[in-house]
Amino acid sequence: MNAPKFWMVVPALLVAGAVGLAYAKLPAPPPVDPAKAAEAKAKAAEATKKARADEEKAMDRVVERYKKEKGIKTAAAPAKKK
């Protein structure tokens, strides 16, 4: 009768041991340097801005090609934003 109770506890002990080992092996996170974090954030913002500009150029090319293929004439090209 004691055997089933013992075998019910074994998986719980194995899981607890595995979790303990996993936490023991994790390294401490590196300290965050505010200057490096700000530089990385600025670099990411610049990359996002460049990607958006490239995307807008591609969209303009697609619109122009569509209009050319469909024979749509435009009065004047709108001024581009900078």
Image (cartoon, rainbow, N blue to C red):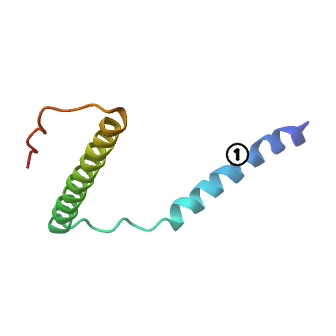
With 80 as the anchor, is 62 left or right in this view? right
The quadrant in which residue 72 appears is top left
Please give the residue where the numbered disc 1 appears in the rendered image: 12
The quadrant in which residue 70 appears is top left
Q: Nearer the viewer, residue 20 or 25?
A: 25
Q: How many marks?
A: 1
The residue depicted at 30 percent of the width and 39 percent of the height is: 63
Q: Nearer the viewer, residue 55 or 5?
A: 55
**Whole-percent x, y for residue 30 in the image:** 32, 68
**Whole-percent x, y for residue 38 in the image:** 16, 61
Q: Nearer the viewer, residue 51 or 76?
A: 76
With 8 as the anchor, is 53 left or right in this view? left
**Whole-percent x, y for residue 12 in the image:** 70, 45
The residue depicted at 8 percent of the width and 42 percent of the height is: 79
With 11 as the anchor, is 25 left or right in this view? left
With 50 as the anchor, is 78 left or right in this view? left
Q: Is 47 situated above or below 68?
A: below
- The quarter of the image holding the N terminus is top right
Other residues around mark 1 within 10 Å, as few (<14) / some (14–19) / many (≥20): few
**Whole-percent x, y for residue 82 in the image:** 8, 49
The residue depicted at 53 percent of the width and 67 percent of the height is: 25
